Amino acid sequence: MTKIQVWSVVSLLGVALGCGRGSLAATTTVSVSSTASHPIPTSLYGQMFEDINSGDGGLYAELLQNRAFQQVTPGTTGALVGWSATGGSQISVIKDTVPVSSALPNSLQVTIPSGSSGSVGVLNSGFWGIKVDPTWTYTASFWVRFPSASSFSGNVNVGIRSTTGTVLAQATARVTNNNAKWSQVQVKFKPSATTISTNNNFFLTVDGASWGGQTVHFALLSLFPPTFNNRPNGMRVDIAEALIEMAPSFFRFPGGNNVGQTVDTRWQWNATVGPLLNRPGRVGDWGYANTDGLGLLEYLQFFEDAKMEPIMAVWSGYALGGTNLAENQLAPYIQQAIDQINFVIGDPSKSAPAALRASLGHPAPFALQYVEVGNEDFFAAGTYPYRWRDFVGNLTAAFPQLRFIATTDTFNPILSPNPLQYDVHVYQTPTWFAQNAFFYDDFQRNQTKYFEGEYAAISTNPNDLFGTPADGRLTFPTMQSAAGEAAFMTGLERNSDIVFAASYAPLLQHVNGSQWTPDLISFDAGTVYKSTSFYVQKLFSLNRGDEYIPSTLPSRTGTLFWSITRATAAGNLQIKVVNTASTAGSLSFQLPFNNVASTGTLQVLTGPETASNTPETPNAVLPVTSTISTGKTINYSPAPFSVSVITVKAS
Ligand SMILES: *[C@@H]1O[C@H](CO)[C@@H](O)[C@H](O)[C@H]1NC(C)=O
Ligand SMILES: *[C@@H]1O[C@H](CO)[C@@H](O)[C@H](O)[C@H]1NC(C)=O
Ligand SMILES: *[C@@H]1O[C@H](CO)[C@@H](O)[C@H](O)[C@H]1NC(C)=O
Ligand SMILES: *[C@@H]1O[C@H](CO)[C@@H](O)[C@H](O)[C@H]1NC(C)=O
């Protein structure tokens, strides 16, 4: 049975307003209800994350690339990604006969030839550069071992220098042979440089004359800038702040696709916790090794710092590469999912994973309400019925308080137990999003709820959505794509009695090493670039209100969309207006309230159809805030390709 909000459409061919292109816009009158139809779920807006050149080299603040030679083949050029020799050293990645740890079998072997002079050693390029900020204190560390015992000792210089060789920051540490055993060195330093730059390398060098003839092994080298909330092994400050600027309620992790390409390379929580020396890393799903330095505890600590809750995925017996486990093979993976959840919320006195969490400094459980069973299992719908049944059966028995999200198409196949949450994904054109603003209006109102877990307008070409920019694929969100998404989001708000969460995807991309476009936020070694879609997410999230106020419905086939919410504590009505057309619109909102302030606040994001915020034009389209005159009637003419929020006190 479908609940239909009945509001008479009063479309008046009223005052004809001239607009930019000389056409006439008929005014649409929008009657606003005095009472709310449903609360806005506090979980409504959040973020979708997976390591798609966005964890390592992105949100995770580590500055060195390939810092621990994880998941590489020793002896190959590929094993040296990020690294190069300087001053005549000979370098290679070796499988060490005495590894620094069993999880990190590989070391960087550096030979300083006899007769060397000057600075000799290695460079690391970082993730397409290393940022020098004169105000930062850096922490560099590495493990070092000489392959054979001697009485040798010498100085090692570590720091940051420009790609042309100017030293910008450095520190010196004394290293002794230590009977051919591993020892760890840590130094802190501040740049001597006085300007910000990113075209830099990390260096680790020795004096060739005094070190000539020595061979040294290095493992787990690291360079950290200050981190968000000063967490050791934490997050990059500017990226974390950009995420928090959108006031997200949730963070979907660890994938997405990054839950597993093969059974063996699936994301396993227990390989991501504890000392970095114990983390083997894994071959991620996007063509590069993940360090797992951004591990389960680091994620959880970040969510707590950022005041958001995880929507956490567990691997559910299907690998993206095509492997589907048989039902009689599932038991150990179900146990691993139980352990993963216990690490997050278990009682340390009853569960070993929870006791591990306590031993790592967080005895209290983290917040967790939603667990996603797999990812995009519509690709493996044939086996999902038994996988869903066995995972959810066991997980519900262990954690009756949790809610489980299914990842197949809604109601296809039929699953038992009947999912009460589905994760719905859509990558489409801006036009599709506008035309589907009523997507959820026709869904039955019953106990089943929806997580719009991945959505983005990615192409202007409906016949080649995933093609190339030449065929319409977007490299960055545009004003048109952002307006299309915003139109769709007015529908998410109207249907937030059944849509409990929504997140644009993907969240982050490094512009120099990207696997997918467009993305909500782009960044490089030094700067964060916020897209038009970012500002739409921010406008909706910060103005989401706590109640939905019904109003005359927009036309299902039109180009003007709106959604009205109320922030009850502040006494504010929030009127969101989206125009997806190339001509201005004309709307007249009729408010049934006795006390409406004579002025309100207007926030508008608008720009040319194809305008994008890019590294070259980072501020092409920005929201502009102004004052708007308001009253029981609010006339508003939304600009072409615009997303507006009118905030007015009304009671
Ligand atoms: C990164 O990408 C930007 C934008 O395309 C480009 O200007 C820059 O040179 C690239 N940097 C590196 C280190 O490749
Ligand atoms: C993680 O736990 C699984 C069992 O659930 C085990 O097979 C695997 O070896 C463990 N990995 C690490 C790195 O401890
Ligand atoms: C738990 O998983 C096992 C192994 O797949 C399965 O046989 C059993 O039926 C499941 N239990 C419940 C309650 O679903
Ligand atoms: C809700 O309605 C859909 C569509 O008819 C149905 O498939 C689903 O099973 C229903 N959910 C519940 C919990 O009954």
Image (cartoon, helix red, strand yellow):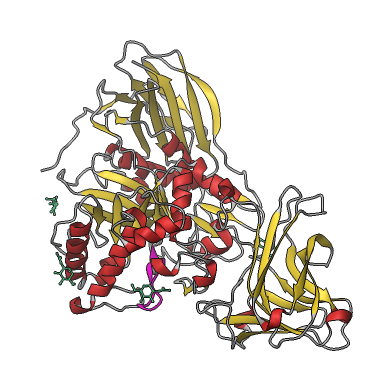
**Looking at the image, is 623 positioned above or below residue 439?**
above
Please identify the dominant SS of the magenta region. Answer: loop
- Residue furthest to the left in view is 1
Identify which residue, 93 or 164, lies in the foreground: 93
Q: Position of residue 172 (x, y in %)?
A: 79, 65
Q: Is residue 618 magenta?
A: no
Magenta region: 256-267
Q: Position of residue 311 (x, y in %)?
A: 35, 53
The structure residue drawn at horizontal position 54% and vertical position 36%, both measured from the top left corner, is: 623
Q: Position of residue 193 (x, y in %)?
A: 82, 53
Q: Position of residue 10 (x, y in %)?
A: 26, 25
**Looking at the image, is 91 positioned above or below residue 162?**
below
- Residue 583 visible in this rendered orientation of the protein: no
Residue 409 lies in what quarter of the image? bottom left
Horizontal side, residue 273 vs residue 233: left or right: left
The structure residue drawn at horizontal position 43% and vertical position 65%, both measured from the top left corner, is: 466
Horizontal side, residue 13 vs residue 70: left or right: left
The structure residue drawn at horizontal position 72% and vertical position 86%, both measured from the top left corner, is: 149
- Residue 64 visible in this rendered orientation of the protein: yes
Looking at the rendering, in which quadrant would you find the N terminus?
top left
Q: Looking at the image, how many numbered discs can be counted on the residues?
A: 0
Image-quarter location of ligand 2: bottom left
Q: Is residue 265 magenta?
A: yes
